[in-house]
Image (spheres, coloured by chain):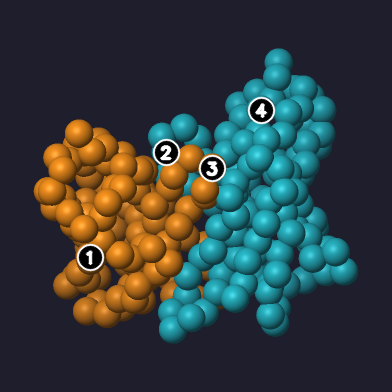
Amino acid sequence: DGGITQSPKYLFRKEGQNVTLSCEQNLNHDAMYWYRQDPGQGLRLIYYSQIVNDFQKGDIAEGYSVSREKKESFPLTVTSAQKNPTAFYLCASSIPDRNTEAFFGQGTRLTVV
Amino acid sequence: AQSVAQPEDQVNVAEGNPLTVKCTYSVSGNPYLFWYVQYPNRGLQFLLKYITGDNLVKGSYGFEAEFNKSQTSFHLKKPSALVSDSALYFCAVREWTGGFKTIFGAGTRLFVKA
């Protein structure tokens, strides 16, 4: 089945640690996205990539980093510089066109302990 | 910049009654508008989109949305609500800023009471 897989589903981070969230898609989509979801704030864009080896900062990129070495994969690293990382993280992919919808993974819930 | 607004944090409706979830937009040029639904601890699922053409757009699970250019609105509707429709609904717009990205509203939580 085609889709987007995010792992792990739950992740716990200690203060000062970097953690990496995985996102893999087999939809053959060129564009991939990372969003952060906090209660009552909707989805905020962290990073997006329209093509392999290229990505752009979204609205809240500080404290995060990404790579896009393969079309299928768009991992997100939450660095120690991100002061409030506890949130639900969603990865999405789409055809890079104005009239196409995005397909989402099931999310990773990150908690700082 | 493009944006969408969802003026209601929560909508309550009785099962079997019609439901409306409101969305207004602010875009330059032609709007490309979307509705998504999110169930607890899950990713978003696409419901429907307006690109051009008929102002009434039909989507998944019996949902439809009415595009109104003069009121800059794109309200989500369903003639008869089900308890299983209870979820978080997001209105969204596509934008180009060096790449295509989707901008989401804050979301509206729908409660359908049996």
C-alpha distance separating marks 4 and 2: 17 Å
Q: Closer to the N terminus: mark 1 or mark 3?
A: 3
- Specify whether residue B59 is in view: yes
> Residue B91 at x, y = what percent?
63, 54
Q: Which residue is mark 2?
A: B42
Please tell me whether mark 4 or mark 1 is closer to you in this view: 1
Task: Say whether residue A66 is left or right of residue B2.
Answer: left
Q: Chain of mark 1?
A: A
Q: Which residue is mark 3?
A: A40
Q: Which chain is orange?
A: A
C-alpha distance separating marks 1 and 3: 25 Å
C-alpha distance separating marks 4 and 3: 16 Å
- Residue A75: image quadrant is bottom left
Q: Quadrant of the C terminus of chain B?
A: top right
Looking at the picture, which amino acid does disc 4 mark?
Answer: Phe
- Mark 4 Cα within 10 Å, few/some/many (few <14, many 20+)? many
- Chain B colour? cyan
Q: Are marks 1 and 3 in contact (CB under 8 Å)?
A: no
Q: Which residue is mark 4?
A: B111
- Residue A61: image quadrant is bottom left
Please tell me whether mark 4 or mark 3 is closer to you in this view: 3
- Which residue sits at x=74%, y=59%? B24
Please tell me whether mark 1 or mark 2 is closer to you in this view: 1
- Which residue sits at x=55%, y=74%? B95
Looking at the picture, which amino acid does disc 3 mark?
Answer: Gly
Q: Quadrant of the N terminus of chain B?
A: bottom right
Give the structural element (helix, strand or loop) at label 1. Answer: strand
Give the structural element (helix, strand or loop) at label 2. Answer: loop
Numbered circle sitting on residue A65: 1
Give the structural element (helix, strand or loop) at label 3. Answer: loop
Residue at the left extreme of this rendering: A17
Q: Is residue B26 above or below residue B96?
A: above
